[in-house]
Image: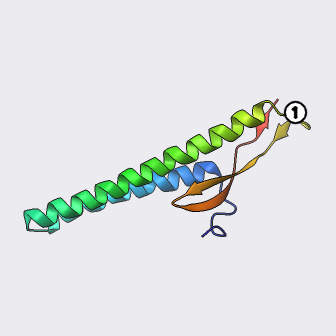
């Protein structure tokens, strides 16, 4: 899985996590219409809402990881006008290398 995400920037990962949350909520709503029993509706809704919350928490984790790297790089000397950093963050239990946006002087 790390090789799939090796060239992805932080914004793409955050958008993927947010998309997972949105798709989970949409699937939960569709299943509420399709499933006839109340127990099935409650169980499927709980599963997909939990999946949406996990996706949103992954988005928050990526944001905090990138912010931590930016803060650490803020004190570093920037030569040549800009500095693009790569950070290793965890995304759904996998270590991925994330390119942060370039830092300017």
Q: Residue furthest right?
A: 80
Instruction: State the quadrant of the C terminus.
Output: top right
Classify residue 71 by image quadrant.
Answer: top right
At horizontal 91% and vertical 36% (from top left) the residue drawn is 79
State how many labels appear: 1
At horizontal 62% and vertical 60% (from top left) the residue drawn is 95
Classify residue 34 by image quadrant.
Answer: bottom left
At horizontal 43% and vertical 48% (from top left) the residue drawn is 56
Q: Residue 1: tell me if it is visible.
A: yes
Q: Residues within 10 Å of mark 1 (few under 14, many from 20)?
A: few
Instruction: State the quadrant of the N terminus.
Output: bottom right
- Residue 51 rendering spot, x and y as whole percentages: 36, 58
**Left or right: residue 23 compared with residue 44:** right
Q: Label 1: which residue?
A: 77
**Left or right: residue 5 compared with residue 78:** left
**Left or right: residue 87 compared with residue 43:** right
Above or below, 38 relative to 52: below
- Residue 25 rendering spot, x and y as whole percentages: 30, 55
Q: Residue furthest left?
A: 37
- Residue 46 rendering spot, x and y as whole percentages: 24, 57
Tell me, what colour scheme is on the image? rainbow
Above or below, 5 relative to 89: below
- Residue 37 rendering spot, x and y as whole percentages: 8, 67
Q: Secondary structure at mark 1?
A: loop
At horizontal 53% and vertical 50% (from top left) the residue drawn is 14
Q: Residue 29: tell me if it is visible.
A: no
């Amino acid at each position: 899985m790390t090789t799939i995400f090796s060239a992805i920037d932080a914004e793409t990962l955050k958008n993927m996590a947010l998309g997972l949350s949105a798709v989970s909520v949409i699937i939960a709503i569709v299943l509420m219409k399709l499933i006839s029993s109340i127990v099935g509706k409650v169980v499927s809704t709980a599963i997909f809402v939990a999946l949406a919350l996990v996706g949103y928490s992954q988005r928050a984790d990526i944001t905090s990881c990138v912010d931590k790297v930016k803060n650490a790089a803020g004190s570093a000397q920037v030569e040549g006008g800009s500095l693009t950093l790569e950070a290793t963050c965890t995304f759904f239990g996998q270590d991925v290398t994330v390119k942060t946006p370039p830092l300017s002087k």
